[in-house]
Image: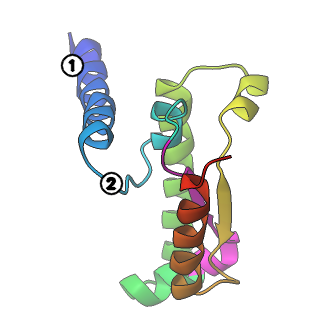
Amino acid sequence: KRIIEKIQNMLFPMEMIKVIVSHESAIILGRGANYVLHDEKEGLNIKLTAPFDYRVENIMKIRNLSKAKAKELVKDTDVERADFINRFFTFDRDSRIKVPFDIVFNTKNLSSELICKSIFVFLDEKKKPA
């Protein structure tokens, strides 16, 4: 029964993501949205990434943590995210390539402002007829 409840708790947000984007413009962060929405024609699947050490430094500053605690938190978060994707979006390794991101931004090298401006440019271009 607990397994069924866990699956239902995960399927509901996935269905909610589909309902939200069918009715509204939305920004969906994480939770496998690129897998849930891979067949949608509108929108962009965007990944924000940064090197491990840079993420550790950010977490140290934001949460006022020691380097050791920040490293542990970043590692644990990476593992949890990977486990989530592997658990709820089962596929073989080769099929992962079939659900790519449209754009990947390295937040170490690009400002938030530049990333946002770029996203708007991509969205405007995508709306134009082919």
Q: Which residues are magenta?
A: 42-56
- The disc at residue 26 is 2
> Distance of mark 2 from mark 1, alpha carbons?
27 Å
Q: Residue furthest right?
A: 94
Residue 69 can be seen, yes or no: yes
User: SS of the residue at dot 1?
Assistant: helix
Residue 2 higher or lower than 100, as above or below: above
Left or right, 73 with respect to 1, comes to right
Badge 2: few (under 14), some or many (20 or more) residues near its Cα, within 10 Å?
A: few
**Image quarter of residue 122:** bottom right
Residue 93 higher or lower than 124, as above or below: above
Image point (40%, 55%), residue name: 29
- The disc at residue 96 is none
Image point (48%, 79%), residue name: 59
Is 60 or 50 nearer to us in this picture? 50
The residue singled out by tag 1 in the image is 5
Left or right, 22 with respect to 50, comes to left
Badge 1: few (under 14), some or many (20 or more) residues near its Cα, within 10 Å?
A: few
Q: Position of residue 96 (x, y in %)?
A: 70, 31
Left or right, 53 with respect to 47, comes to right
**Image quarter of residue 14:** top left
Colour scheme = rainbow
Residue 103 higher or lower than 107, as above or below: above
Is residue 121 in the magenta section? no
Image point (55%, 69%), residue name: 119
